Image (spheres, grey):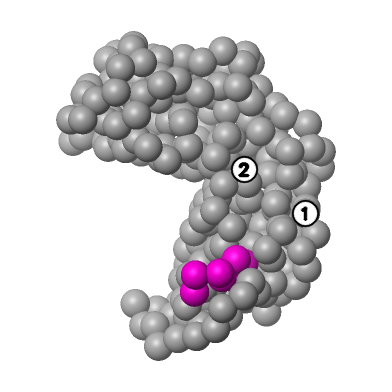
């Protein structure tokens, strides 16, 4: 996360450390920890994802529990109350993976669609609105999803067959659709095929292409797109000399 880290331990428990102001370490306190501390009463975890000030974990069987900052409903429990211990996300099952953004969360469901909850000021929940949600909302016009990645305020998903769709904040072209227009529903990244995985960061996005090359797009003030120039880019560019 921004100032904390969490890890899944063999056997399905979780340990977290770092800043704990809103309770994002999940140990029942708001005390900062400089060494890993066990998240109590949490077992069967298959994966964990840390947002800026909240954390979510997928439990064996397909449920999700979240804890920490909940000002925007990013814990998905139907409230905006911070939680210092894990709380069950309401009304979802069959979850394969979860990705925590700044103040929102998205989950890949076993029906190959995506549900999101929390802050929606830029349309990053993908439900066609900019209304915050304290319980999961289905991302519209999105099927065949194989993976999802939440950035600060934008989300991208890999679609079966190797294409990518993105939605949310697009101030720097991080949705890759050739514009800087925010999108509250998924928009196809054009001329991008053969994608095996995608990663959304603060204001840029990168995708691994079959064969081991990488394409990136969005904010590039520090050269983070890696294509040999500075300045943001609204559509994918090959990272120079990458073979992964």
Main SS of the magenta part reads loop
The local secondary structure at tag 2 comes to strand
Residue occupying the point 27% across, 30% down: 17
Local crowd size for mark 1, using a 10 Å CA cut-off: few (<14), some (14–19), many (≥20): many
| View extreme (bottom): residue | 241
In primary-sequence order, the first of circles 2 and 1 is 2
- Give the residue pinned by disc 1: 182
The residues tagged by marks 2 and 1 sit, at their Cα atoms, a distance apart of 19 Å
Q: Quadrant of the N terminus?
A: top left
Which residue is more in the foreground, 180 or 111?
A: 180
Residue 172 placement: quadrant:
bottom right
Residue interval drawn in magenta: 217-223
Which residue is more in the foreground, 122 or 61?
A: 122
Q: Please provide percent x and percent y for residue 164.
A: 62, 64
The local secondary structure at tag 1 comes to loop
Left or right: 227 in relation to 130: left
As for residue 59 lying within the magenta part, the answer is: no
Residue occupying the point 24% across, 25% down: 33
Q: Is residue 93 above or below residue 222?
A: above
- Give the residue pinned by disc 2: 114
2 vs 1, front mark: 1
Residue 203 placement: quadrant:
bottom right
């Amino acid at each position: 996360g921004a100032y904390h880290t969490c890890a899944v331990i063999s056997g399905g428990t979780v340990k977290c450390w770092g800043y704990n102001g809103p309770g994002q370490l999940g140990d029942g306190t708001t005390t900062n920890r400089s060494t890993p501390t066990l998240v109590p009463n949490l077992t069967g975890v298959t994966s964990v994802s840390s947002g800026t000030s909240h954390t979510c974990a997928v439990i064996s069987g397909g449920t999700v529990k979240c804890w920490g900052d909940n000002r925007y409903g990013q814990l998905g429990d139907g409230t905006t109350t911070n939680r210092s211990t894990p709380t069950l996300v309401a009304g979802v099952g069959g979850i394969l993976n979860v990705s925590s953004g700044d103040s929102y969360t998205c989950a890949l469901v076993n029906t190959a669609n995506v549900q999101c909850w929390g802050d929606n000021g830029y349309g990053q929940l993908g439900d066609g609105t900019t209304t915050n949600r304290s319980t999961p909302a289905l991302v519209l016009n999105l099927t065949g999803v194989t993976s999802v990645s939440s950035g600060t305020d934008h989300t991208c998903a890999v679609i079966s067959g190797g294409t990518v769709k993105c939605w949310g904040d697009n101030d720097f072209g991080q949705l890759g659709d050739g514009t800087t227009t925010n999108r509250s529903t998924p928009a196809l990244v054009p001329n991008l095929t053969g994608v095996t995985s995608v990663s959304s960061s603060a204001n840029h996005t990168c995708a691994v292409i079959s064969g081991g090359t990488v394409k990136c797009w969005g904010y590039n003030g520090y050269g983070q797109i890696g294509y040999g120039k500075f300045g943001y880019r609204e559509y994918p560019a090959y990272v120079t000399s990458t073979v992964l």
